[in-house]
Amino acid sequence: KAGVTQTPRYLIKTRGQQVTLSCSPISGHRSVSWYQQTPGQGLQFLFEYFSETQRNKGNFPGRFSGRQFSNSRSEMNVSTLELGDSALYLCASSLSSVYSYNEQFFGPGTRLTVL
Amino acid sequence: GQNIDQPTEMTATEGAIVQINCTYQTSGFNGLFWYQQHAGEAPTFLSYNVLDGLEEKGRFSSFLSRSKGYSYLLLKELQMKDSASYLCAVMDSNYQLIWGAGTKLIIKP
């Protein structure tokens, strides 16, 4: 069974640009969560999608948005990039919504550097 | 506010035992997770506790005390491959996972 895949793995952008990251969950998984990971800050929850609907959202500005497609693949978009957006962005999938115990399987992440 | 505290870094010797503590203050509680993350890799699931007590899984055990807002991950017979960051996460009343900053464990021969 293929794991969670994320593309691209590395990305370099400049301030003010926008970026779109992609996540393909494990086949059969309907829930996709996005996290931002920075050194010393740990994982910060961005949002969670289940069946194409945003079910939960963290405390990030509106520049961070996402969506989920009918095949459960998900994208997140960051507009007007700031230097502080440089981080590892992780996607995690699970069988169903996190409204119950479901192990999350993480992808390898996209390393975004904003110059 | 919601808060998860764990030590930033710990060092232990190969073959020994190490305990990584996690204390939490969250709005509600629906379970506590431990994940392992090797450098440059994705986090992988280690354990889940929702009731008080000790859960044992091979060399790894996880303990929870809900009244104290406290958990620990116990690693026995340490191996070099256990060098990694260990992440503690709590699911709050909104079923949102709140993550600690992680504990970097260094194993020395």
Image (cartoon, coloured by chain):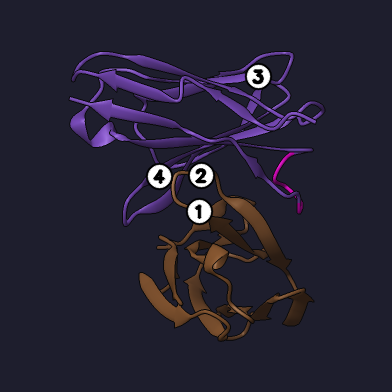
Chain colours: A purple, B brown
**Chain to which the residue tagged by mark 1 belongs:** B
Question: Distance of mark 1 from mark 2, alpha carbons?
Answer: 5 Å
**Which residue corresponds to mark 3?**
A73
**Chain to which the residue tagged by mark 3 belongs:** A
Secondary structure found at label 3: loop
**Which residue corresponds to mark 1?**
B38
**Which residue corresponds to mark 4?**
A37
Residue A98 is a magenta residue: yes
On whether disc 2 and disc 4 are found on a single subunit, the reply is no
Magenta stretch: dominant secondary structure: loop
Q: Which residue is drawn at 66% across and 79% down?
A: B64
Disc 4 packing (10 Å; few <14; some 14–19; many ≥20): some
Contact, CB < 8 Å: mark 4 with mark 3? no
- In the picture provided, is A75 more to the left or to the right than B5? right
**Which residue corresponds to mark 2?**
B41
Contact, CB < 8 Å: mark 3 with mark 1? no
Percent position (x, y) of residue A21? 47, 20
Q: Which residue is drawn at 63% across and 81% down?
A: B77
Residue A85, above or below B48: above
Contact, CB < 8 Å: mark 1 with mark 2? yes
Could you say which is closer to the camera, residue A75 or residue A27? A27
Q: Is residue B91 visible?
A: no
